[in-house]
Each structure stands twice: as structure tokens, then as C-alpha cells.
């Protein structure tokens, strides 16, 4: 049995609407980040999906960007 101690993954990928609900980030902001290349997506048929890994990396990048900078 494989356990992941850092997070619980319910799905391997999410729709845009699911990502909005999970993250609390507005839909237009997510689409803006997708267009800017900050959030990787893929298409399966007509559906645009975000992998759980890409979503986790995106959130980690946002956390890193908003972390206070250490003064030298």
C-alpha cells in the first residue's frame, strides 16, 4: 500500500472548475496563468484538464513567490 504523507490526491487530474473549487483561485486568474505558461494543462477530447502534479507545483510556486524575502 502506497501512502503519500504530503498530500491526499483524490484524482490524477482536475477540470478548470474543480481546480477553482480546490484552490479558491478565480476562474479568470487560472485561465490567465494558463495563458502565461504558469500552469500546465492538457486536453483530452474537448476537455481541458490540469494534472494533480501541475496543480501542486503551481500552488508551491505561488507560495514561494509570496514568501517574504530574506534581507542580506
Image (cartoon, rainbow, N blue to C red):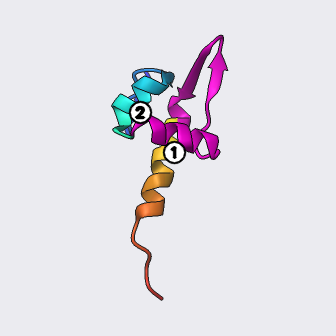
**How far across and down, in percent of the image, does residue 33 sit?**
55, 44
Residue furthest out toward the front = 28
Residue 71 is situated, as x and y percent measured from the top left of the image, at 44, 85
Residue contact between numbered discs 2 and 1, judged by CB atoms under 8 Å: no
Q: Could you tell me residue 65's position as x and y percent?
A: 48, 61
Quadrant where the N terminus sits is top left
Image position, residue 42 (x, y; %): 64, 25
37 in magenta = yes
User: Mark number for residue 58?
Assistant: 1
**Would you say residue 16 is visible in this rendering?**
yes
Q: Is residue 33 magenta?
A: yes
Numbered label tally: 2
Most extreme residue toward the top is 45
Circle 2 SS class: loop
Q: Which residues are magenta?
A: 26-54
Q: Quadrant of residue 50?
A: top right
Snapshot quadrant of residue 19: top left
* Mark 1 residue element: helix
Residue 32 vs 69, above or below: the answer is above
Which disc, if any, is residue 67? Answer: none
Question: Which residue appears at 56% of the width and 23% of the height?
Answer: 49
In this rendering, the label closer to the viewer, 2 or 1: 1
Per the image, the residue denoted by label 2 is: 4
Judging depth in this view, the residue of 9 and 31 nearest the camera is: 31
State whether residue 2 appears in this view: no
Front residue of 69 and 29: 29
* Other residues around mark 2 within 10 Å, as few (<14) / some (14–19) / many (≥20): few
Q: Quadrant of residue 24?
A: top left
The first of marks 2 and 1 along the sequence is: 2
- Asked if residue 21 lies left or right of residue 49, the reply is left
> Badge 1, how many Cα within 10 Å: few under 14, some, many 20+?
some
Amino acid at each position: 500500500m502506497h501512502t503519500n504523507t504530503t498530500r491526499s490526491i483524490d484524482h490524477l487530474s482536475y477540470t478548470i472548475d474543480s481546480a477553482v473549487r480546490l484552490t479558491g483561485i478565480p476562474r479568470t486568474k487560472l485561465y490567465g496563468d494558463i495563458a502565461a505558461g504558469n500552469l500546465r494543462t492538457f486536453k483530452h477530447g474537448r476537455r481541458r484538464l490540469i494534472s494533480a502534479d501541475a496543480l501542486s507545483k503551481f500552488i508551491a510556486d505561488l507560495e514561494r513567490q509570496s514568501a517574504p524575502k530574506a534581507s542580506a
